[in-house]
Image (tube, rainbow, N blue to C red):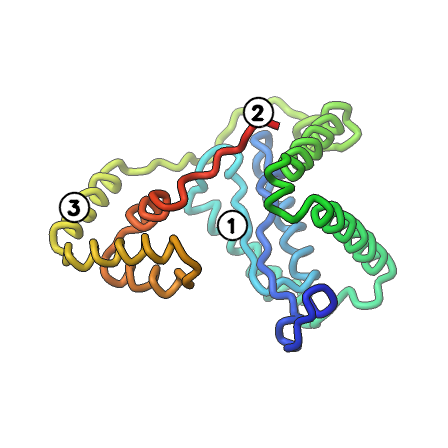
Amino acid sequence: MRERFKAQKPSSWQLRFHTQTAGSTLTAQQPENNVVRVTLQALSAVLGGTQSLHTNSMDEALWLPTEKSVRVALRTQQIIAHESGVADSIDPLAGSYLIEHLTDEIEKGALEYIAKIDEMGGAMQSIERGFMQNEIQNAAYAAQQAIERKEQVIVGVNQFNVDETLTLERLKVDTSIELGQREELKRLRESRNRESVERLRGRLVEAAKGTENLMPLFIECVENDVTLGEICNTLRSVWGEYVAEGF
């Protein structure tokens, strides 16, 4: 921020970040193994200095997580925070040659990507040309090839397999919840001030056509019972929806 964008305030030079463990690494096979994967990923995030952390549940490769699996994910964070001792130091890996080397490699690769994107005219132009999409697709394809060739071992998937019957509890959603929400939404729309809703949606249309900061208007809309769907549909009426062209 200081070097590229010439930011003047030291607070704007700081990197505050949230980390979520990698859902793409979770496996439907031997799903209990995902507890270990998530633990290692969460520990890595803490060692890296994250300010906020989300841990995935072990059964997310199969279905929406159950209350029990969510609790295990939460306890994973709490054990790291209160039992491991890793949070007792601001930078427990400070001075590690390996970490410093890997950090330099990541920075080098990131700057190379930024330079490529700049040459294309920026992020929007690189998306329009399909550059970012292709990079993601190529990386995913290469990763899958490595798994298929067993160059990348995935425990329980391409090595250390077992024949097992899945015994995990499955999440069951009570359909009455949806019906209750529908009724609640109906009551909201019947009881709210319709003139206020229409006025705010009109203001939102005009603001979306210009350069006004929309966040205060979003807050006012929500405070006056304009639903999220109505806000999004109002914006779509002005901006439309992005449709990727062939590339």
For the residue marked with disc 2, what is the amino acid?
Glu
Q: Residues within 10 Å of mark 3 (few under 14, many from 20)?
A: few
Q: Which mark is residue 25?
A: none
Question: Residue at image x 67%, y 64%?
Answer: 49
Image height check: is 37 above or below 209?
A: above
Farthest right residue in view: 97
Q: Nearer the viewer, mark 3 or mark 2?
A: 3
> As shown in the figure, which amino acid type bears the numbered disc 3?
Lys
Q: Earlier in the sequence, mark 3 or mark 2?
A: 2
Number of marks: 3
Which callout, 3 or 1, points at the residue further toward the start of the chain? 1
- Circle 1 sits on which residue? 72
Q: Which residue was labeled with disc 2?
A: 164
Asked if the residue at tag 2 contacts the one at tag 1, i.e. Cβ–Cβ closer than 8 Å, the answer is no
Classify mark 1: helix, strand or loop. Answer: helix
Q: CA distance from mark 3 to mark 2?
A: 47 Å
| Label 2 crowd bin: few (<14), some (14–19), many (20+), radius 10 Å | few
Q: Quadrant of the N terminus?
A: bottom right
Give the quadrant of residue 199.
bottom left
| Mark 3, secondary structure of its residue | helix
Q: Earlier in the sequence, mark 1 or mark 2?
A: 1
Judged left or right of residue 177, residue 85 is right
Q: CA distance from mark 1 to mark 2?
A: 22 Å
Q: Is residue 76 left or right of residue 117?
A: left
Which quadrant is home to the C terminus?
A: top right
On residue 186, the disc is 3
Q: Position of residue 10 (x, y in %)?
A: 66, 77
